[in-house]
Image (spheres, grey):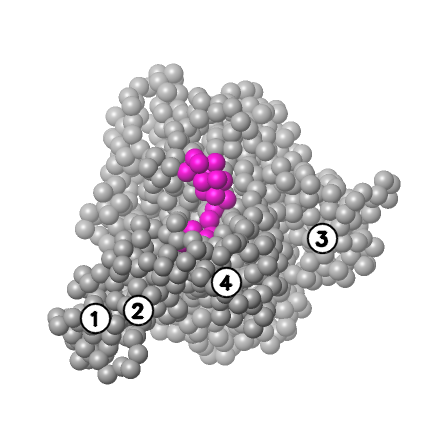
Amino acid sequence: MLWGSNARETHPIYFHHVLKGIHNGARLFVIDPRRTSSARWAEHWLGLDVGTDIALANAIGREIIASGLVNHAFVERATSGFEEYKKRVESYTLERAAQITKVPAAQIRQLAHTYAQADRAQICWTLGITEHHNAVDGVTAIINLALLTGHVGRYGSGLNPLRGQNNVQGGGDMGALPNKLPGGQDVENPEIRARWQELWGGKTIPPRRGKHLSEMFEAMGKKDLTALFVLGENPAQSEADAIQTLHHLRGLECLIVQDIFMTRTAKLAHVVLPAGASWCESEGTVTSSERRVQRVRKALEPPGEARDDIEILCNLARRLGRDWGKVTAKEAWDEMRSLSTWHAGMSYERLEELGGLHWPCPDASHPGSPFLHGRLWQDPVGGPRAPFCPADDEPPVDKLSDEFPIRLTTGRRLDCYNTGVQTGGYTSPLRRGESLDLSPEDGARHGVLDGERVRVTSRRGSVEVCVRYVDSLRAGLAFMTLHFPDEVETNVLTIDATDPKSGTAEFKATAIRIEKIEAGAKPRHPATASARRH
Amino acid sequence: MIDPATGRNQRMIELTIDGRTVSVPEGSTILDACRTLEIDTPTLCYLENLTPVNVCRVCVVELEGSRVLVPSCSRKVEPKMVVRTDSERVRLSRKMVYEFLGSSTDLSFAPGEVHRQMESYEAKPDRFGARTLPAKSGERDHAHAGHHQPAVAGHAQTVFQPVKVDNDLYVRDYSRCILCYKCVEACGEDAQNTFAISVAGRGFDARISTEYATPLPDSACVYCGNCIAVCPTGALMAKSEHDLRERGQWEPAKQSVTSTICPYCGVGCTLELHVQDNRIVKATSPLDHSVTSGHLCIKGRFGWEFVQNLGPLTSRDAP
């Protein structure tokens, strides 16, 4: 089950494995508002309305329960809260879910039965689930299905969020989160903090969790946060509600940017620290979506004055009065390993010999863990039971109305990546520049032609962009990317309604209207020529 | 023997090759058995990450009880098989394959291994006479079966033609194409499943083609470049390499190869960066890596220019 993910384009080599499975008889269900290139490979495409995922998940859960397909032995041994979950999903009948999601009841039923009766089944999701104001609820609604059926903790089954960046998993694992130290350890736990404090010669670690990205921007708005150090991120263009974001960044007393590019964010900075590209101009590790830690190696000398990230940070520490000496990536890694049981057994030598290892890998003889949660299959269950976390359906924050009748959703295209600063470096024959993808039905309804330039307006701002008719969208749904912010700043339109737990903004659901630009008719696809630059 | 994939015990099959007895797991090919015995067996169309298509015939061996020579890359071992890999018949057959391919195509970019094998089989492609001149651009793309010109007497027929350069990422130099089908397989079910190319035409006119021979930008191609990675003769080549070769600046002796991880999505594909003079000139992925099996997408294969898309070497401006 591929849920809110267009892996064919966003994770192409992962999708090679899916295709291998399909050729071997595996069945693929794709749940996505768009009929994506991934959906074209599916046995069934469930084209739900944007932001109705929880209603769909709850209906699948209810149908599994109502049809007697629950894995009771697993639920009784390894989970808690089933009765409460059962009560909460009771009202999500197939008919009601069909009304909310626009997916035919028969299709929901078929998915529920196929999933529950499969020998092994996986649910993989991407930002279609997590870029919503209730992202964490969406994820738990999906996890509940795996708990109902026991499709977790076994080889070939499981729950897989497909990570969008080569080290977003590793960044979190290393403690680049407001509430964690490396190895997923809670910063608010005094015993854990004590271990670090001991290693670092008694230096005190702040005892409270910090702010996540969205909270930081809120704090900037209130002037509680006045200095910002940005490493390898381009929030001026990647954050939702770009006008507001720029206002906050400009209001900072001190903005330091460490990056390999002179990004829009770097141009706003008081100090720019040019860095080497972490994946080919320095040594280190990254952790992929499957928790596999792999080595990155230096293939090139960084240009000009650019330096290795570690060197920059050590020099900065020296200026701040702490001399850490010359630290290599391996030394930093080994220090981290000494306090993270996930990584303790992952020496550079083993990583190189074995082509990477999956955490947890607690000691030097451990083979790594290709899948997690196997403990749920121990009898009695190893450790705490896995709780059902019931969640209710809540529509997107940016409501559709007569004034803003079209739902805009965002995503990536195959040959591009995020704000385009990396993919802008090569010429792709597939690239057409930014467009507002629309169904021909909507084009007719709003009187705009394929290739015509239009003004797109949301409750926060407006941009001009060319329309492109596509057959992957149903009426009422539009699509844009964030790849060409210098050409069309899509994030002027998006809403910064964020999930209270994850802090992720609702990039997937914006209410827009489109208007023809009457004066000065422009040629078809004027975006194409300028896109060559990118 | 325990199969690492299934955890089940595997039956071992015993056979005889060149008078030596060998035992290999059930399901192995004769080629696998030959390699177990370290018998030097040439291949062209075979690759570990693709389904064997048996078209080049250079790996053929003599099998007792079989009327014809059998392709070792795909023929599964059976108990009590008796195989000969170095008989006169096998040697002649392999030599002819090399001679036909060598006389009709340009093998100058094929790896040293191919040239070494050609020497060891005493293949002499030149004995068929001077090569015919290159066809005009596009001429071979539209050849109809049964309509081709008779061969020029005393000349070796060739598939020579101008290089197709129709996009910024890779070129197709079909003068070098030996029709091994590897690109078709990598574009198709074995990896990419895009099906942008196939074999068109018959006999000597057979060639790799997009639908209706359209230029790549008008085809279904998504520029993963997996066809380039499997091409054994340099017929498909990244434009970065092609351009350097054209300028006489392609210097393998000055190149280093460094393994790292692709800077894009979270799949964790291993990239081998081929670097010359502190510039990446090509990216590949190892065949035996469990994530990629040697395959990449457009971003991994071509999307690294951003680290060196530099005017003066000191500024790296975002676009």
Q: Which mark is residue B87?
A: 1
Q: Measured from the top left, where is residue B30 in percent x and y?
A: 25, 71
Q: How many residues crowd around disc 4 within 10 Å: few (fewer than 14), some, or many (20 or more)? A: few
- Start and end of the magenta stretch? B233-250
| Apparent side of residue A3 relative to residue B295 in the rendered image (left or right) | right
Q: In whole angstroms, how far apart are the C-alphas of marks 1 and 2?
A: 10 Å
Q: Position of residue A381 (x, y in %)?
A: 29, 64
Identify the secondary structure beneath mark 4.
Answer: loop
Name which of mark 4 and mark 2 comes first in the sequence. 2
Give residue B82's position: percent from left, percent from top: 18, 77
The reply to the same-chain question for discs 2 and 3 is no
**Mark whose residue sits in front, 4 or 2:** 4
Residue A468 got which mark?
Answer: 3
Mark 3 vs mark 4, foreground winner is 4
Verify whether residue B243 appears in magenta: yes
Q: Residue beneath label 2, please?
A: B93
- Which residue is under mark 4? B152
SS of the residue under disc 2: helix
